[in-house]
Amino acid sequence: MTAQVQRDGAAAAGAAEIRDIDAYMTGLGEVARRAAASLRRTPTGPKNAALLAMAERLEASREEILSANARDLARGRETGLDDALLDRLALDDQRVDGMIEGLRQVASLPDPVGEIDGLRARPSGIQVGQMRVPLGVIGIIYESRPNVTLEAASLCLKSGNAAILRGGSEARDSNAAIATCIREGLTAAGLPEGAVQVVATTDRAAVGRLIAMPEFVDVIIPRGGKSLIERISREARVPVIKHLDGICHVYLDATADPDKALAIAVNAKTHRYGTCNTMETLLVDAPLAASLLPKLAAAYAEHGVELRGCERTRAILPQVSVAVEEDWQTEYLAPVLAIRVVDGIDAAMAHIECYSSHHTDAIVTESWSLARRFLAEVDSSSVMINASTRFADGFEYGLGAEIGISTDKLHARGPVGLEGLTTRKYVVLGDGQVRQ
């Protein structure tokens, strides 16, 4: 497949069907593999130049991007997308500003590629260490969020990886507009356009082929709903970095400062509903429940949040709905919150161990010993003390942006930034040594 065909396909963003999906995806894979080889030889300067050029193109194309997004939103409303998906799909000036800032921040970050760690001398006289190197070609499959197109492109490029991006049909116009900025930025810096390719068809067969091309693709990163990620995990012949659910908890300990507890519990739920780091279950220590739950209920009512509570919660807040077993297991991605009153940190951590998706869990406490226990014993990719779960984000962690959040333990965990998109190889420095 020629570069021109790829450009035209990306611009069409699925407007025309591609008849031979296997041949098309094989072509993308071949181009990506060549681009990955080129990127391994690319120093930091051109990569940063491309990122800054993308930021300039994004600023210059702001109106076109927002217009394209408006078309996607209108189509989404017509087809019945729910509020959570529409929220993920929507772009505004603030989110475009965030995308531009993310590009500039990634450009300012140290390049991990080529770093050598742990160099040590051996008795033979050789020195042994480990060098960070790109993973190679990364396939990203995502739904709704058009900003993922830019975040994925920037992080893959800075870490020396080629990327094949397959966005959802609901964001096809937005993704096409952003892809144009990416392509122009690559060209301005003299880098191969094949470094970032946007799949130009919404045919589901393209996903099936992308996740089954180990000869071209080294890692798959899915971002989207549970059904998508379950499908990818089940069918992929390529390693997958993923998380299935964001069932996040906040535990309010009896020693918590009431003002801190109120602010954190409200922010963790209401800052945004359709994100994986939004709190879905609130755990309240029994001695704090009678005084704090009414204040929390009033604050949540102002935001229109539906509350579902255990029996002890409903004894204090009889107006709330009964929480059933399914509520503790649900990622609502909506203004719905489950509340349970517990007897101390051991009961809170037992609940988290049973129901957490190992994404992000937080404790609000003034006891350092309890905070230390929570940090050590809660097995999640992010564990927080006295902070909203909404901080579990690559941008907030100083990664510039994130390509996703992993709840796996191999190969990356938590927000996946530049280092998570590299691996290590052993390097040996010698001066003529031979093994005796």
Image: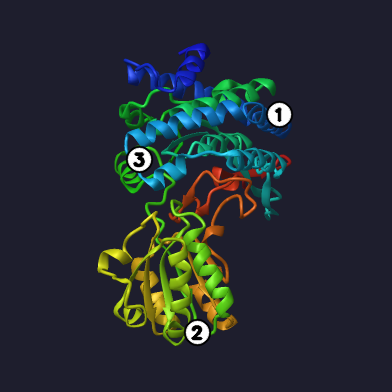
Which mark's residue is nearer the viewer, 1 or 3? 3
Q: Using the image, tell me which numbered label, if any, was put on residue 434.
A: none
Q: CA distance from mark 1 to mark 3?
A: 40 Å
Where residue 347 sits in the image (x, y, percent)? 38, 80
Which numbered disc, 1 or 3, marks the residue that appears first in the sequence? 1
Name the residue nearer the viewer: 146 or 403. 146
Colour option used: rainbow
Q: Which residue is mark 1?
A: 46
Where residue 14 sits in the image (x, y, percent)? 40, 22
Residue 131, placed above or below residue 170: below
Q: Using the image, tell me which numbered label, if any, was put on residue 254.
A: 2
Name the residue nearer the viewer: 85 or 366. 85
Q: Say which quarter of the image contains residue 42.
A: top right
Name the residue nearer the viewer: 432 or 14. 14
Where residue 248 sits in the image (x, y, percent)? 43, 63
Q: Secondary structure at mark 3?
A: loop
Amino acid, disc 1: Pro
Quarter in which the N terminus is drawn: top left
Which numbered disc, 2 or 1, marks the residue that appears first in the sequence? 1
Which mark's residue is nearer the viewer, 2 or 1? 2
- Kindly check if marks 3 and 2 are in contact, taking CB atoms under 8 A apart as contact: no
Amino acid, disc 3: Leu
Where residue 329 sits in the image (x, y, percent)? 31, 63
At horizontal 56% and vertical 58% (from top left) the residue drawn is: 391
Q: CA distance from mark 3 to mark 2?
A: 41 Å
At horizontal 33% and vertical 72% (from top left) the residue drawn is: 320
Q: Which residue is mark 3?
A: 81
Which numbered disc, 3 or 2, marks the residue that appears first in the sequence? 3
Q: Say which quarter of the image contains residue 238.
A: top left
- Kindly check if marks 1 and 3 are in contact, taking CB atoms under 8 A apart as contact: no
Amino acid, disc 2: Ala
Residue 315 appears in view? yes
